[in-house]
Image (cartoon, rainbow, N blue to C red):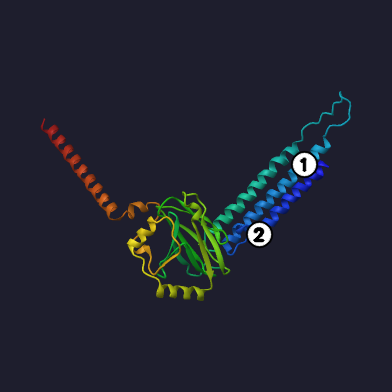
Amino acid sequence: MKRKGLLLALFSALLVLLTGCNQLAVLNPKGPVAKTQSQVIIFSILTMAIILLVVYTLYIYMLTKYRASKAAPDYEPPHVEGSKWLEITWITIPIIIVAVLSVVTVRSTAAVEKVPEGYEDQKPLVIYAASSNWKWHFSYPEEGIETVNYVNLPTNRPVEFRLYSFGPITSFWVPQLAGQKYAMSDMVNTLNIVAEHEGSYMGKNSNFSGEGFAHMEFEALAMTPSEYDDWVKEVKDTASELTEPEFDKLLETAHVGRQTYTSTHLEFRPAPEGENAGHHHGGENGAAEESEQTQMDHSTMDHSDMDMTESSDHEAHN
């Protein structure tokens, strides 16, 4: 009875897990990048399920075979020597499992870092995605427009997101299109995606970054190329220009709704360029501080050279 109850519980848990898979966005991919990642997830789940099945089967077998019996109290079971082949087997199997999972992970990671296969010949749409407390700014330098808290994408065209932050580290994530990637203040991370199906997909910040973290959600709307072109034209005809004072006000405001502009903040607040971006994009104050530091260094070098020269002349005179 106990064994039947255990099997019933395991079957019920498996049934609940399988019926809930349709609610998991990561297992309902709408692009090649997300599809690659979902396949890795499913492969890993099946591998672990097989391992658990073997372990639980052996566990039940051992409990049944070596359970307490009605043998005499002084009964001693026969002595059994260890098996060299069994030891080799249970050492080799885990090594094989880890090696297979490692190869799959490395290959899939390398694949999702590149433009998806079949789209290499197309020019990618570049979108700068910058986070601030607690919102997302999407800049389209090719179209000369900017949106806040929503991003529109043409289907079947590679999109290159360039991620950075105006505040703490955040994580850009659209589960049905691609995995998450960090956005940081002094460097730009690149995320390549392709939306192969029209639809509205939820995007969010998956890295805790403060009290407004839960509200950092945005809509990624995939539309046909013609619909995308119509949307760009409508924005240029109806939206207002994004000025620097307006952008500074956006950064200071904690929560805002959807916003649309006919220019981008990249014109007056360029994105960082690599890990040393802070040294190149410090603005006028940063440039002044660097210039002042350079002058101080030259002054120190000059005085040092003069002191060394005077000291040498004094020694020669003596």
Q: Position of residue 28 (x, y in %)?
A: 62, 61
Which residue ends up furthest to the left in the rendered image?
317
Instruction: Residue at 55% x, 63% y: name it.
Output: 201
Based on the displayed image, in which of its 4 quarters is residue 72 positioned? top right
* Residue 182 left/right relative to 25: left
**Which residue type carries mark 1?**
Leu
The quarter in which the N terminus is drawn is top right
Corner quadrant of residue 43: bottom right
Label 2 crowding class (10 Å Cα cut-off): few <14, some 14-19, many 20+? few
| Residue found 41% across the figure and 74% down from its top | 238
Q: Is residue 272 visible?
A: no
Q: Is residue 247 visible?
A: yes
Q: Which residue is mark 1?
A: 58
The residue drawn where x is 17% and y is 37% is 307
Q: Does residue 64 lie above or below 228 as drawn?
A: above
Q: Nearer the viewer, residue 14 or 188?
A: 14
What amino acid does circle 2 point to? Answer: Asn
* Near-viewer residue (68 or 248): 248
**Dividing the image into 4 quarters, which one contains the C terminus?**
top left
Residue position marked by numbered label 2 in the rendering: 22
**Percent from the top left, x then y, of residue 290?**
27, 50
Decide which of 86, 114 is in the foreground and name it: 114
Q: Is 79 placed above or below 148 here?
A: above
The quadrant where residue 85 appears: top right
